[in-house]
Image (cartoon, grey):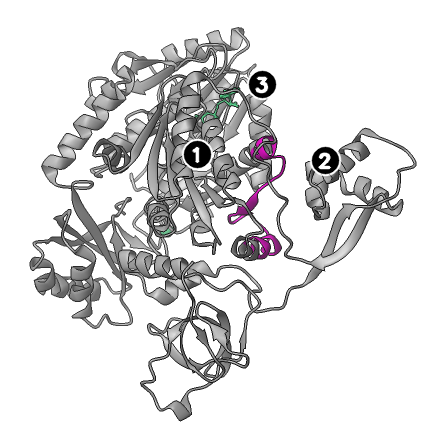
Amino acid sequence: MTEQSFFPEGGLISVLTAEPIDRFLDYKAPEGGCFEGAFVEVPLGPRKVLGVVWGAGEGRFNPAKIRAATRVMDVAPMRTEMRDFLTRSGAYTLTPISQMLRLATRAPGLMSPPSMRKIYRLGTGTPDRVTDARTRVLQILKDHGGAAFTLKELATLADTGPTVVKGLVKQGVVQEFDAPRDVPFPTLDPNFGGIILSPEQAEASAALCASVETGRYNTTLLKGVTGSGKTETYMEAIATCLRKGRQALVLLPEIALTAEFLTRVQARFGARPAEWHSGVTMTDRRRTWRMVGEGGAELVVGARSALFLPFRDLGLIIVDEEHDGSYKQEEGVLYNARDMAVLRASLCSASVILASATPSLETWNNAQTGKYNRVNLTARYGVAEMPEMRAIDMRQEKLPASHWISPSLANAVETRMKAGEQALLFINRRGYAPTTVCRACGQQVGCDFCDARMVEHRFQNRLICHQCGESKPVPDTCPSCEVEGKMAPVGPGVERLAEEVAERFPDARVTTLSSDLFGSARALKERIESIAAGEADIIVGTQLVAKGHNFPHLTLVGVIDADLGLQGSDLRAAERTFQLMRQVAGRAGRSEKPGVAMLQTFQPEHPVIRAILSGDEEGFWRTECGERQQAAVPPFGRLAGIILSAEDAQQVFEFAGEMARRDGPLQSIGAQVFGPAPAPIARVRGRHRVRMLIKSDKSAPLQHAISQWVNQFRVPNAIRLAVDIDPVNFF
Ligand code: ADP
Ligand code: ZN
């Protein structure tokens, strides 16, 4: 740890606040002085705000006018490496540092003193009556030495209810204490559980553990088919990290996956880790944030923003399903958590494991060139095999109008049902129907605020805009020609497919899985468990089912529209379709019974569809890499998106035109500007959007040139400008 300077009371300090002022402010050190990195409360106008002591003050202002910081906050100071991380990630994404600090302090109550709550420890009494639940509670307390638990933790670990614990308290067997609310999380025992790894898994695990053991920065791609034991394997790397006394972070792409993951952590390490995502309560957020900084949380499982937690000694970051699009934050600070994980690890001498069955092309290429290590798991664990892949040529199938399940697919489903197995019908489209058309005038119903069609959601009985969330009732009268009773849905969404399934297979137990249909992560988790337990014959689902769930009875996957993702002109259309189809197919045949994946397609000869069917993954990546290299696009060149938006279309177009004309700083690094052009979604929430795309060589100092370029202009207040470095979605 580097030496931190100390500033005696009254000494000049430079403070960064999370307020939207784009510079550091000078203050005098508070009473008692403060260390560099300390969280302090400072006066700002009439308010008191949170800030971090970034270093010595610059003394550029009249010293008599400089105000004093009010006090030092009772939280662990921000470490040098965290400050470096915020500086570097801000510079990379062209985000003001104050906004980066906001990202790093998103926990409630950082400015308030610690509050109290009840905790539980082993007491001295003996219970009047011994029950299984009571024995489990006592065993947990004994297993964890003198550790204290919250009521919820103890009850969950013992798989019982709070009343059992309370009963033991009454008899003095368990003691109840008042303690600061933010208590350390239960310690994890690296030797608690563990399974016997297959020889291939053991080899992979040894390589990962050795990387962690070095205590130096490194990144490894853990490539393994779904069900090959990637999770089991990287758990061993976590164990190594914990044994070294360092902290670990696991990023998951979907909150719905955390529940299953927490259970697996408990089985492996005897206790549950800290959690960090939008479903976590404010109290737990605050506890996690503080304990991560004090070393009272050894393992955090969370969403991308967990990357900005103030870890005391982070030794390992795992990015599970690293190819997943949700790692890219598309609002506020536009960052890619996968790339920022690598940056953070390089600053704190940690290892990164990027796990995926279908890695992103960037990662695959980094492993090819030796920038990352690569570890492979080629076989599914146990007897399970990868499913057989087949195409259904839709040009040969006879289908009535408004039906999407081909006779071939329907036959296959029936066969599975007779055998008592499950089938999954996949469509990557939420809602009932993607368009609502008037049969009299042919007009589609669009959103009033966006250039997007309204999607019918029959479950909620409304039309919803997937861009801005605006909704309205399904109209009876056409908004254009005012003819009544002619509005009709066109095309399938998951809800409509479910309707067809119910009609086609009246005796089947059908379950629909789509993110709209669940109010809570808990409800979704229960549904997923019931499917895993075999309580459904046919599952109809969106993207949501493609991610990581384990359905042992599932042996058939039918993809309703394999061509869907190929239509865009997006740089990543091929890559995405390939990943998604392989992921979905990977759901079939995860236990003893072999699986089949059937892809309904109108273009079975398409190179991407053929690559999916043949399973020649390395061949696909090589071809795709070749094409990107030819076009000098990522990962062989660099891209940045510039999105300008305003309510006034003419104003935003003129301003963008002006920017494009004065592109000297970009030209000086040999970068090209494409556009301005209307963004693919040209209007969102009533704002007109114009996009420019900047393309440069891989080695060009792109960020520097862009900020010089942008700084030439005074952006009018009515115009919003966003810079998206390494754009993932082109909307
Ligand atoms: P992946 O993360 O690659 O999809 P998992 O680690 O989830 O694979 O493993 C798939 C399933 O196989 C899980 O239920 C897991 O517990 C089980 N499994 C994997 N390896 C082993 C092993 N060596 N011993 C017992 N079960 C295993
Ligand atoms: Zn809209």
Q: Which residue is mark 1?
A: 432
Q: Position of residue 116 (x, y in %)?
A: 70, 61
Labelled pair 1, 3 in contact (Cβ < 8 Å): no
- Asked whether residue 270 is drawn in magenta, I would say yes
Secondary element under disc 2, as helix, strand or loop, is: loop
Q: Is residue 478 visible?
A: no
Q: CA distance from mark 1 to mark 3?
A: 26 Å
Q: Is residue 238 visible?
A: yes
- Tell me the quarter of the image containing the N terminus: bottom left
> For this rendering, which residue is in front, 277 or 393?
277
- Which is closer to the viewer, label 2 or label 3? 2
Residue where numbered disc 3 is placed: 534
Kindly identify which residue carries mark 2.
158
Foreground: 580 or 316?
316
Q: Magenta segment range?
A: 265-288
Question: Mark 1 belongs to which amino acid?
Answer: Tyr
Instruction: Indicate the amino acid at tag 2.
Output: Ala
How far is the residue under mark 2 from the one under mark 3?
26 Å
Task: Identify the element where label 3 is drawn.
Answer: loop
